[in-house]
Image (cartoon, rainbow, N blue to C red):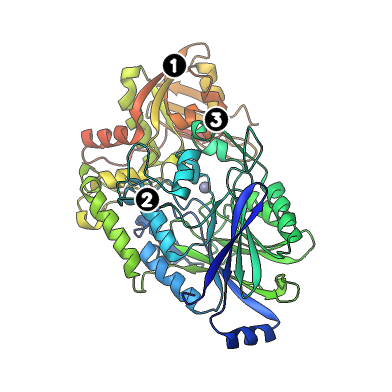
Amino acid sequence: MSSFRRTAALVATAGVGLAITFAGSPAQADVDAQRAQRTVDVRLIGINDLHGNIEPPTGSSGRVTLADGTTVNAGGAAYNATHIKNLRAQVKNSVVVGQGDLIGASPIVSALFHDEPTIDILNKVGLETTAAGNHEFDEGYKELLRIQQGGCHPVDGCQFNPTYTGAKFPILGANVTKVKTGLPALPPFWVEIRDGIPIGFIGMPLKDVPILVDPNGIKELQFGDEIKAANKYADLLNLIGIKSIVLLVHQGDQTAANGGPNGCTNTPGPGQLIAEKVSPKIDAVFSGHSHQHYNCTVKDPAGNPRPFIEGLAFGRELSVVDLKIDRKTRDVVRSETKAENKIVTQDVTPDPAIQAVIDQAKTKSGPIANKQIGTISADIVRAQAPTGESPLGNLIADSQLAATTGNGAVIALMNPGGVRADLTFPSSPQNEGNGVVTYGEAFTVQPFGNILQTVTLTGAQLKTVLEQQFTATRTIVLQPSANLTYSWSTSAPFGSKIADLKISGTPVDPATSYRVTINSFLQGGGDGFPGFTVGTAITGGGIDLDAFAAYLGSHPNQAPPALGRITTIP
Ligand SMILES: [Zn+2]
């Protein structure tokens, strides 16, 4: 690809400047040969939910389970880069794209520098465009614009390199508009040209971003329906003669059974709905967000097949879709599309240029990351039991209560989505066998830097918020501190599932006030818990990670907390 001459032209559309990249052929003989061909092959390589995992992820986050149940270690940006290079070398035309959450909720090696090392690496591997995910908005819209355009962080400055020049790939948000003007807040699409054929990429986050990130950072934005936005821009692209159209959407499905990288074992959910319902003008749907992998073919509204694919998070898989495009119609020959999730195995030579960036980030973050903060006696995992509890979630809730008893807190509740990784024993290669927990490992578990807040809820309001864990579309069981116990009914209707609610063994009284510690994300109503926003007498309680680190420090040889705080009844 490097020999291709590239020029850029600007097309102004929908109030947003969009650059179109032309990839020309190096030799006239080649051009003539291509013209003689009736189709053009283009390979698309998708990355989703990397979450700044430039180093190989550890524990279960660093393994892929194959269809036969065996596992393969996978991930790491230097291996990823080599796999991308190899995949590109096999074909004449390729485009590398992303489906969002490439940054945010990252390990310390990237997060300490506001993910600038990850952007640097994605620039170097030649990512052409990506959808914004929810995590791209973690630090707010203004920070996302800085990530895109460059410039030093307003508070921390340029800590990684002397300058930060921004992402060379556009971060798309076709359903993201400004509240005031209704105009796009991010570019809605991007066009790449291969062998004279334009390919349009419409990208966007899921419409639920407002319940997934700190509401304060996205006040000026509105997140619209994914299908509506996709169809609007598919029509527009079609109108300007772009017939090969790909959707990059940061939304996906859960999987019911282990189907390996290329099984189609998703439980039809919001991802499949989008994949099936968006305009027949869209030829392939790359998805993300659910941290699952699947490789499906769905029927579009006109009855034609198109791929619906997601690769495993943290850079463990690349989603490869090979399109055959008819030169005359400039549209994809759907029956010829091939899709495959490729595992980012660690048996290839790591890309030296990418490794250099990783090494620089490790060196700069090392002294902080490697500091010992505590010890554990066994793995403490975040996997949730059928009751919804997890040992690590319980431990974090305990740490948040301990940090805020000064606020009068009597219980703490933690959103399970904020528990990002397991604490493993042995923890890291250099601490083999001794159960040491480093600051970097704790950071990987709790990377968001949420502020703890203690609010007053009545017993009735507490029950209401616990009922909000269960809705028709999702179950999110909050992780409770040790002294909060209750049971929930698997069969009772929504709104009346909670029973036997007790604090330190005493039944919760509906009219009595209780001080409850949560993080700022939940306090803002995040994860669909509006019940916390009615809390009064809000008191700040420091950063969640600091509470976690302090708790580990004061509880050496910490064992996994027992489950049983929550029970289920029929
Ligand atoms: Zn996401």
User: What's the residue at 46%, 74% (across, down)?
Assistant: 2
User: What's the residue at 64%, 61% (across, down)?
Assistant: 200
The residue pinned by badge 1 equals 514
Of labels 2 and 3, the one closer to you:
2
Q: CA distance from mark 2 to mark 3?
A: 37 Å
Q: CA distance from mark 2 to mark 1?
A: 47 Å
Q: Answer yes or no: disc 3 within 8 Å of ligand 1.
A: no
User: What's the residue at 45%, 41% (across, down)?
Assistant: 143
The disc at residue 529 is 3
The disc at residue 164 is 2
Please state if 482 lies on the left or on the right of 189 as rendered. left
- Residue 384 seen in this snapshot: no
Residue sitting nearer the eye, 219 or 481: 219
> Residue 361: x percent and y percent?
29, 54
Q: Earlier in the sequence, mark 1 or mark 3?
A: 1
Up the image or down, 1 lies above or below 534; here it is below
Say what amino acid the circle numbered 1 marks: Tyr
The kind of secondary structure element at disc 2 is loop
Residue sitting nearer the eye, 160 or 516: 160
Q: Earlier in the sequence, mark 2 or mark 1?
A: 2
Say what amino acid the circle numbered 3 marks: Phe
Q: CA distance from mark 1 to mark 3?
A: 17 Å
Please state if 436 lies on the left or on the right of 104 as rendered. left
**For mark 3, does the 10 Å Cα neighbourhood hold few (<14), some (14 to 19), or many (20 or more) residues?**
many
**For mark 2, does the 10 Å Cα neighbourhood hold few (<14), some (14 to 19), or many (20 or more) residues?**
many
Residue sitting nearer the eye, 6 or 451: 6
